[in-house]
Image (cartoon, grey):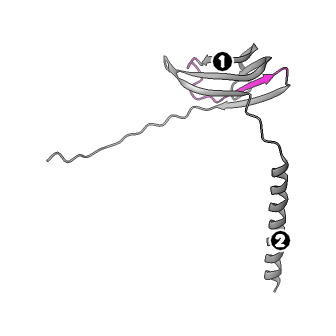
């Protein structure tokens, strides 16, 4: 008897929680598109190249900071403009096995976005047997 009351109470709690969260989600405004996009575009001379796209219709001042795992600043620069595309090449000297964080801070909107760059290397060895005749 106790187990069935507990099951009913748990089911009621879950139902009420789902109902409340569904109502609150329906009342929220749709989220805006991200203001920045950082993507890996390839390697140049064994060094990774990244492209940072700043999608802002109004002119803004953006501070881009690259930090290593220990929090040391590797690179920092400020860019001004409305729709900015910048490419960054990380020299592979010393960054092969290090995770980097990229912070993009908008001075006008006082907003910050953080990206993590991790390099994973895997080596695959495959043996294939084919029947010739």
Label 2 – label 1 distance at C-alpha: 52 Å
Residue 75 colored magenta? Answer: no
Residue 119, x across and y down, in percent? 57, 31
Instruction: Give the label on residue 85, or none.
Output: 1
Residue 81, x across and y down, in percent? 75, 14
Quadrant, the N terminus: bottom right
- Give, as a single range, the part of the protein colored magenta: 91-108
Residue 129, x across and y down, in percent? 25, 46
Q: Residue at left 79%, top 72%?
A: 11
Residue 16 lies, with reference to residue 30, above or below; the image says below
* SS assignment for the magenta stretch, majority: loop
Question: Which residue of the protein is positioned furthest toward the bottom in this rendering?
Answer: 1
Question: Quick one: SS at disc 2?
Answer: helix
Q: Residue at left 85%, top 49%?
A: 27
Q: Residue at left 71%, top 18%?
A: 83
Residue 132 lies, with reference to residue 60, above or below; the image says below
Mark 2 and mark 1 lie on one chain; the one further toward the N terminus is 2
Can you identify the residue that label 2 sits on?
A: 12
Look at the numbered discs 2 and 1 and tell me whether their residues touch, using CB distance below 8 Å: no
Q: Callout 2: few (<14), some (14-19), or many (20+) C-alpha neighbours within 10 Å?
A: few
């Amino acid at each position: 008897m106790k187990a069935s009351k507990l099951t009913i109470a748990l089911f009621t709690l879950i139902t009420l929680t789902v109902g409340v969260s569904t109502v609150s989600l329906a009342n929220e405004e749709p989220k805006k598109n991200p203001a920045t996009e950082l993507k890996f575009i390839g390697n140049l001379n064994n060094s990774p190249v990244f492209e940072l796209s700043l999608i802002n219709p109004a002119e803004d001042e953006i501070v881009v900071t690259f930090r290593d795992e220990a929090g040391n600043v590797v690179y920092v620069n400020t860019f001004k403009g409305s729709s900015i595309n910048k490419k960054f090449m990380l020299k592979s000297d010393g960054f092969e096995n290090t995770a980097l964080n990229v912070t993009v801070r908008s001075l006008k909107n006082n907003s910050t976005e953080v990206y993590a760059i991790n390099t994973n290397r895997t080596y695959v060895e495959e043996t294939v047997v084919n029947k010739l005749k």
